C-alpha cells in the first residue's frame, strides 16, 4: 500500500475566459483578451458555460485560487510560460474583482 499525502484545495476560485484569436492577434495581451469573469470568489466545483465556439474559433479559460487573503495567481510558474498573465488580466475591465 502506498501512502499519498492529500493536498487541501482552496475553498474559492476565480475563473476568466476569452477568445484565443484576440489573444493571438494582440501578442498575448490579456488586458484586451479577457471577455468575461465567469466566476468570482466561488466555492462551486462545477461551472456552466453555454457558448460553443464557431468553426476555427478558440476559447481559453484560466482559474486561480481566491480567498480571504486575496486572489492567487493565473500564472503557472512553468518554465514554458511566456510572460506574466496576472498584470494583464488585472488590467482588463472584464477581469474578476
Image: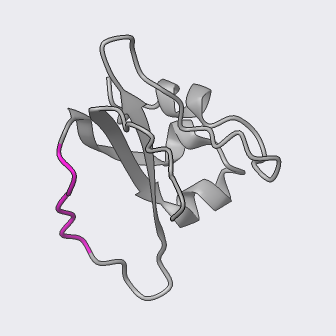
Image spot of residue 16 (x, y percent)? 38, 45
Asked if residue 80 is positioned above or below residue 53 in the image, the reply reads above
Picture residue at 20% right of the left edge, 36% below the top: 42
Residue farthest toward the top in the current orientation of the protein: 69
Work out whether residue 39 can be spotted.
yes
Picture residue at 82% right of the left edge, 47% below the top: 79
Image spot of residue 93 (x, y percent)? 38, 29
The answer to which of 85 and 80 lies nearer the viewer is 80
Image spot of residue 15 (x, y percent)? 35, 44
Residue 53 placement: quadrant:
bottom left
Asked if residue 57 is positioned above or below residue 80 in the image, the reply reads below
Q: Which residues are magenta?
A: 44-51
Residue 79 lies left or right of residue 18; in this view the side is right
The answer to which of 11 and 25 lies nearer the viewer is 11
Residue 82 lies left or right of residue 69; in this view the side is right
Picture residue at 19% right of the left edge, 38% below the top: 43
Residue farthest toward the front in the current orientation of the protein: 1
Residue 11 lies left or right of residue 92; in this view the side is left
Majority secondary structure of magenta residues: loop
Residue farthest toward the right in the current orientation of the protein: 79
* Magenta run includes residue 45: yes
Residue farthest toward the bottom in the current orientation of the protein: 55
* Magenta run includes residue 63: no
Image spot of residue 87 (x, y percent)? 60, 26
Asked if residue 62 is positioned above or below residue 74 in the image, the reply reads below
The answer to which of 14 and 95 lies nearer the viewer is 14
Picture residue at 45% right of the left edge, 31% below the top: 92
Q: Check the image and tell me how it is coloured.
A: one colour
Residue 23 lies left or right of residue 11; in this view the side is right
Amino acid at each position: 500500500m502506498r501512502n499519498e499525502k492529500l493536498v487541501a484545495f482552496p475553498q474559492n476560485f476565480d475563473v476568466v475566459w476569452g477568445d484565443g484569436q484576440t489573444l493571438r492577434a494582440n501578442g498575448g495581451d490579456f488586458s484586451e483578451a479577457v471577455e468575461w469573469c465567469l466566476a468570482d470568489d466561488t466555492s462551486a466545483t462545477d461551472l456552466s458555460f453555454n457558448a460553443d465556439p464557431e468553426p476555427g474559433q478558440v476559447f481559453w479559460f484560466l482559474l486561480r485560487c481566491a480567498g480571504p487573503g486575496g486572489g492567487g495567481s493565473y500564472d503557472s510558474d512553468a518554465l514554458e510560460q511566456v510572460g506574466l498573465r496576472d498584470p494583464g488580466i488585472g488590467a482588463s475591465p472584464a477581469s474578476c474583482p
